[in-house]
Structures are given as structure tokens and as C-alpha cells.
Amino acid sequence: MNEEICELLKPIFGQDVKVQSSSPTGGGCINETSVLTLNNGEQVFLKQNAHPPQDFFAAEAKGLQHLAQAVKGPKIPKPLAWQDSFLILEYIEESAPGPDFPVRFARSLAELHRVSHNNFGLDHNNYIGSTLQKNFPTGNGLDFFRDQRLRAQQELARQFGKLPLSIDKNLSKLCDQLENYLDISGEKPALLHGDLWSGNYFPDARQVPCIFDPAVYFGLREADLAMTELFGRLPQKFYDAYHEAFPLNLGYEERKDLYNLYHLLNHLNLFGGSYLASVEQVVQRYIG
């Protein structure tokens, strides 16, 4: 593996580049991650997976390149090289968030969301965790979220036998009535991180907000904000600063659980029945 990595890094760091040491890091439950120290003193970040889905790391590299379009957006680790089973990234050292980080993060995220496109979706599919995320372009944001987010996960849950019939029926009813609950008036396709939970952002040594591990697409920007609230929550000044920089339609608090239903369904499909009660709770909240 090290020889293959060195060959890919030679155009960047020179012909004599070698991996001097490797330090495992705390990663997610899908990939193994480590920091490689090179013989020139530089460090790079390695993600590897012995049996990833097809084009898994290539899709992540493309996603990071998309995010880098936002000049005033969050800092993005540069993808340096990749193969089927691994991805090498620029290494950014994590720092503890200071008091100004939430506001800086909010403003940079608003700048990312100002990057727009003609359609919702993307020119290729990618992954949310290890689940294939379909991004077929469409001009209607509500149709995109209903069909390629909620119903796509619903169909997977049916195939895996993880969705009891009563919840399945109510979820279908919710999808059929989605326009009653989502106000997307005036919303253009926004460049989204796509999986913006607390493990996928941090400040660097200068408190610059950094985001990584994306599931990129052009979508409804409230989906990114809602994801920051699913597993823990940023301080309120983050949400206040975002709204000041890029105001949301009234009623976000009533809509955010709908966006997170996509991620709860995905976690149900990936990790099992412990997420079923949360799925049912959200569905019942809207159609109960």
C-alpha cells in the first residue's frame, strides 16, 4: 500500500517521497483513517476501505472539488490522490472551537449555499455513508427531495425488511402530502455539504471552519442546517448568524425534522432497528 501511495504522491511531493510513519485516527464506522507523515515532514490524511462501493472515493473527491467552488465558504481539504480502495487528502489539524467559531462557520456556510445551479441534484450519483445517493437533476426541489431522498430511502427499507407496514403506509402518505409541510418558495438549488453532522466539521488552528466527508448535491439549504441539529446542536448564535447572512423562510423549526427524516431512514438502513422509533416519531408528527 505504501509503495502505491508514494507513486501517487510523487508528482506533488517529489520523486524521493516516502511514508515515514502512520498514525491511526478516530474515524467513522465505514472507513479506516490515519495521518501519514512523509520523509519531507509533510503530513497527509488517508482514508481506506478494503471493499468500498464502486467509485466511492472518486465520488468523495469530486464532492470536495465541488465544495471548493465557494471562495468565501468553509475550508475544504484538497483531494490529492485516490484509487478504488483509498483516498489521500490534504491534512488539516483540528482545533478546539473558540467563542467566535459558530458565527464564522454560519457565515461561511451561507456563502457555500449561495453557489447555485439550474437544477436540483448533481451530474453524478454519490454516497450518503455507504448508501448510494441518487442525484438525477430536476428543476423542482420538492420533487427532488420527495423522490430521490425520502422515497429512495423508503424503497431501500422495504427491500431490507426494516419498515413495518403501518409506518410504510404513513410515510407514503407524508410523501404524497409533502407540499403541505415544506415551504420552498424562492429557494434556488444551493450547493450543500449533504451530511453536515458534528463529526464532519471543525475549526483549524486559526479557527477557520473546515468541512469534509461530504455527500454533495444542489438541494434545499435547510437540509444542511437541519443536519447540524440531528446529533447534537451548534450554539444558537450559529443559527442566528446564518439567518442574518442568508435569511430563511419563516417556519424552519417546523420543517427541520422532515429534512432529517432522510438521514434517520438512511441510518435505519445502514445500522438497523434502533432508528425505527425516531423514524416513526417524525412521520407521526406530520401526519398523526
Image: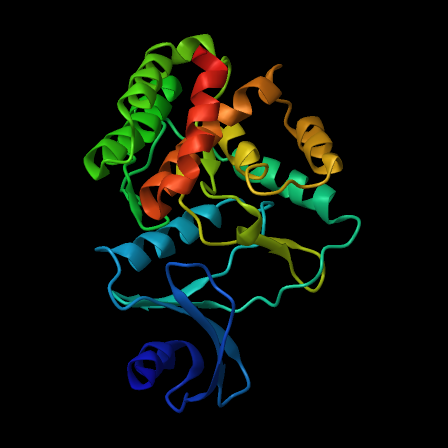
Q: Residue at x 37, y 88 (%)?
A: 15
Which image quadrant for residue 73?
A: top right
Q: Residue at x 26, y 60 (%)?
A: 52
The answer to which of 139 and 265 lies nearer the viewer is 265
Whether residue 245 is visible? yes
Query: For the image shown, how many numbered marks are present on the structure?
Result: 0
Location of the N terminus by quadrant is bottom left
Is 39 drawn above or below residue 52 in the view shown?
A: below
Is 250 drawn above or below residue 22 in the view shown?
A: above
- Left or right: 189 in relation to 211: left
Image position, residue 53 (x, y; %): 24, 55
- Left or right: 186 in relation to 155: right
The answer to which of 29 and 215 lies nearer the viewer is 29
Image position, residue 265 (x, y; %): 37, 34
Image position, residue 245 (x, y; %): 68, 30
* Colouring of the image: rainbow
Is 178 drawn above or below residue 231 in the view shown?
A: above
Which image quadrant for residue 32?
A: bottom left
Tell which residue pokes out farthest to the right in this image.
Answer: 99
Location of the C terminus by quadrant is top left
Is 184 drawn above or below residue 15 in the view shown?
A: above
Q: Residue at x 52, y 35 (%)?
A: 224
Whether residue 119 is visible? no
Image position, residue 271 (x, y; %): 36, 47
